[in-house]
Image: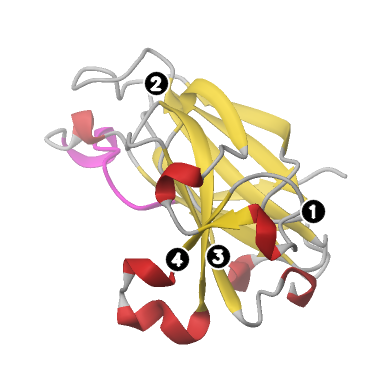
Amino acid sequence: GNAHQTNKKMYIVSNDGYWENGNDMILGRVLKSKINLLNSCDWQFYKGGDGLLDANWGLELSSAKPFLVNPGKLSMSGVQYNEPLKKYLMIQWYYTNGSGHLAPTDSTWLFYESPTPWGPWKEFGSQKFPNDGYYSPAFAPKFISPDGLKLVIFTNGNFMTHAKPGDECRYRLTQIPCTLKV
């Protein structure tokens, strides 16, 4: 973690403006001591290259270069550091049948790993959910096993089922156990 200055800086990812089915991801950083000030002037954006070098960060959002591009398959997501594996992990998701108000009936998750917050990012797995529009998957470091291979993923369900009775309603917080293979 501290090799990437995470003891002093916080890294934040964002896609290109879509909550679902976006196209690329950018990386920003801010000093932890300044995060609570909410001043846009305190942020820097990754421009490419070695992220440890200050020259590869710009003050303008327009200077940001995507660290990951996958058209139509990058949604609002987060990155977590898996300490035992010494890797950053990100679960991306998208609605398999496109975006829009009728789309959330099927979803696919893409699993990415990287040795640093800025990459290189590599897809190492995927999971399809036919008939379930699970979105915004995330895991918390608290629920990572000591070997880093077992995680608990939290996700929201298909909001198109919110009015259905009992188990037919899949619009709720859902915990999904996950085992990574090395």
Q: Give me the disc on residue 115.
A: 1
Q: In which quarter of the image is the C terminus?
A: top right
Going from N to C along the chain, the mark reached first, 4 or 1, is 4
Task: Confirm or deny contact between disc 3 and disc 1 (CB under 8 A).
Answer: no
Foreground pick, 2 / 155 = 2
Residue placed under numbered mark 3 in the picture: 140
Residue 39 vertical placement versus 70 (above, below): below
Mark whose residue sits in front, 1 or 2: 1
Mark whose residue sits in front, 4 or 2: 4
Instruction: Tell me which residue sits at (64%, 29%) in the image.
Output: 126
Instruction: Tell me which residue sits at (82%, 67%) in the image.
Output: 84
Instruction: Give the SS element for disc 3.
Output: loop
> Is residue 147 left or right of 79 when viewed as pictured?
right
Residue 60 position, x and y percent, is 43, 53
The residues bearing labels 4 and 2 have C-alpha atoms spaced at a distance of 36 Å
The residues bearing labels 2 and 3 have C-alpha atoms spaced at a distance of 24 Å
Does the magenta portion include 166? yes
Instruction: Give the SS element for disc 4.
Output: loop
Tell which residue pokes out farthest to the bottom in this image: 33
Residue 143 position, x and y percent, is 61, 67
Mark whose residue sits in front, 3 or 4: 4
Three-letter code, disc 2: Asp
Residue 28 vertical placement versus 120 (above, below): below
Q: What stretch is highlighted in magenta?
A: 165-174
Is disc 2 surrounded by few (<14), some (14 to 19) or many (20+) residues within 10 Å?
A: some
Residue placed under numbered mark 2 in the picture: 106
Going from N to C along the chain, the mark reached first, 1 or 2, is 2
Q: Quadrant of residue 42?
A: bottom left
Going from N to C along the chain, the mark reached first, 2 or 3, is 2
Which colour style is shown? Answer: secondary structure
